[in-house]
Every structure is written in C-alpha cells, then in structure tokens.
Image (spheres, rainbow, N blue to C red):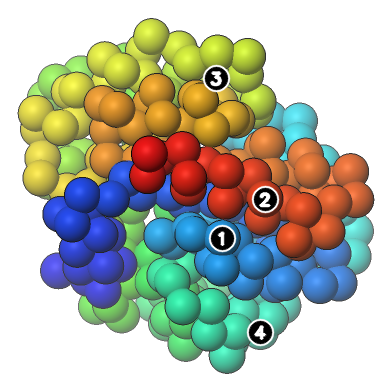
C-alpha cells in the first residue's frame, strides 16, 4: 500500500469525505502559495497539473492555465523544483500527459516525482492496455498510479481499473472535458455506486464539481471529490491564494456538515 493510499484510507475510515483541489503548476510566480493555502483550508491531498501543450482531457479553463504556464517557461523539472521542499503537510498528486512521461523515461520520471515530494500520478491519456510498464516503474519508486474510470466503462474493465489503481480510483463524473458545470450529472452518482461496489479503494469523483453544494451531492455516494476548474478560474481572474482557499474551506465545511 502506498503512502498516498494509507493517508486517504485513514481519513476516509475516520468518517471524513475527501477533498482534493487542483492547481496548475507554474501558472504564476507564487503558485506554490496556492498549494499551501489549499492544504491549510482543509484539503486531504492536492493535485498538481504539470502543463502540456495538448491537454486532451482539459476544458478551456485549465487549458488557459496550461498555456499561461508554458508561456512562462514552465517545464516538468521546474514544477518539481518548485515543489521540492514545499512541505505542505498533505500528499501531492501529479497530473500530466504521457508524452512528458515517455520523453523523460518511466523510471526517471517516477523517481523525479518522488524526489520532489509527490506521492501519486495521474496520466489520463495512457490507456489500461499500455500502462503496465509505467505502473511497474511508478510502483518501484513508491509512486501511486491513480487510474480513471468513466461513466461508459464496462463492468469488466471497471474491475480491472480498480484492481490496478493505487492511492485511490478517480471517477470521471461525466463524459467530456474538465470544466465548471451548473449541476451534477446523474452519471456521477451511478458511477460512484459502481466503484464502491467494485473496490475498497477510496473512490473520488471529479470533473464539473464547482460548488460546495455539488461537492456534498457527489460525496454522498462516493468517498470524496476533486475540484479543479472552479479554483483555477479564480486564480486566473487574479484571486489571491487566500481568496481561492476560501472556496476550499467552504467545501470542507460543507463536506463535514
């Protein structure tokens, strides 16, 4: 069991709904201050986006943040350098695309993430059939490979995803890209129930969760939520770390109620 899984299991088993906010690495000069603020506001772990030029699963908000970060000269190495020694008090999970992993090499990329203090990795465009080599390298380094399940994932495939995922299993609430939504898709509840029936791993739902009310609705049938675009939108609009963290604190309060 990885350190990420131990941490999240312990909090879940204590009755806590998990809250995992997202920050795009390198989006601004003081971007790590947002990571620290989110941890202080009650995050159980924090997802760090490593920018890529073709983020196929990301909607316009995170695409905008990635473009801004890349224009600043952000690279995987610079993100890791910024995180090294940050000591935010909760696990960090890198999210990026396979091109960057492949270019660096599996062993090297996994090892550098661990050296930077990252506990897990999400590589959404690496399909199940082609991920064993990466999973092996990540596992050898002590890094949790978090796999994703979608509403259209077949039962057989869902079981395999749950068997091989480490840290937690990430349920994609709806078909489409990331982004803020006005309401929660019915597919979120259905998929959460399927995940809970298939694994004892923490089942955390993401995509389109933008408000405290939406977070509590989705968490009622799952173990927690990932919140990304709503926070990145505030950041892009100039909100300070403390201002963005207010939304994390409000979600924390709602989930604990």
Asked whether the viewer can see residue 187, the reply is yes
Residue at 38%, 9% in the rendered image:
186
Residue 176 circle label: 3
Residue positioned most to the front? 257
Instruction: Give the farthest residue toward the top.
Output: 186
Per the model, the C-alpha gap separating discs 4 and 3 is: 32 Å
The residue that disc 1 covers is 41
Mark 1 vs 2, N-terminal side: 1
Which residue lies under the disc numbered 4?
Answer: 81
Say whether disc 4 or disc 1 marks the residue closer to the N-terminus: 1
What residue appears at the point 26 percent right and 26 percent down from the top-left corner?
221
Numbered disc 4: secondary structure: helix
* Mark-to-mark CA distance, 1 and 2: 7 Å
Characterize the local packing of mark 3: few (<14), some (14-19) or many (20 or more) Cα atoms within 10 angstroms.
some
Q: Is residue 138 left or right of residue 237?
A: left
Please determine whether, in this image, residue 124 is positioned above or below residue 158. below
Q: Are marks 2 and 3 in contact (CB under 8 Å)?
A: no
> Are the residues tagged 1 and 2 within 8 Å (C-beta)?
yes
Q: CA distance from mark 4 to mark 1?
A: 24 Å
The quadrant holding residue 13 is bottom left
Q: Quadrant of residue 133?
A: bottom left
Residue at the disc numbered 2: 246
Tell me, yes or no, whether the two marked residues, 4 and 1, touch with CB atoms within 8 Å.
Answer: no
């Amino acid at each position: 069991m990885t350190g990420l899984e131990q941490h999240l299991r312990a909090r879940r088993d204590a009755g806590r709904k998990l809250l995992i906010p997202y920050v795009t690495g390198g989006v601004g000069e003081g971007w790590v201050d947002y990571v620290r603020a989110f941890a202080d506001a009650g995050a159980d772990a924090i997802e760090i986006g490593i920018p890529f030029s073709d983020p196929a699963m990301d909607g316009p908000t995170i695409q905008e943040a990635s473009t801004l970060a890349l224009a600043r000269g952000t690279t995987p190495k610079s993100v890791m350098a910024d995180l090294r020694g940050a000591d935010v008090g909760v696990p960090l999970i890198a999210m990026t695309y396979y091109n960057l992993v492949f270019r660096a090499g599996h062993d090297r990329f996994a090892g550098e993430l661990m050296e930077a203090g990252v506990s897990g990795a999400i590589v959404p465009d690496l399909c199940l059939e082609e991920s064993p080599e990466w999973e092996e390298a990540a596992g050898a380094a002590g890094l949790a490979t978090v796999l994703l399940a979608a509403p259209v994932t077949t039962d057989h495939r869902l079981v395999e995803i749950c068997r091989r995922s480490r840290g937690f299993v990430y349920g994609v609430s709806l078909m489409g890209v990331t982004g803020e939504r006005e309401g929660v898709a019915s597919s979120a509840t259905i998929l959460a129930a399927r995940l809970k029936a298939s694994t004892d791993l923490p089942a955390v739902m993401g995509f389109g969760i933008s408000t405290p009310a939406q977070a509590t609705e989705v968490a009622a049938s799952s173990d927690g939520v990932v919140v990304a675009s709503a926070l990145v939108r505030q950041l892009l609009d100039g909100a300070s770390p403390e201002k963005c963290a207010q939304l994390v604190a409000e979600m924390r309060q709602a989930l604990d109620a």
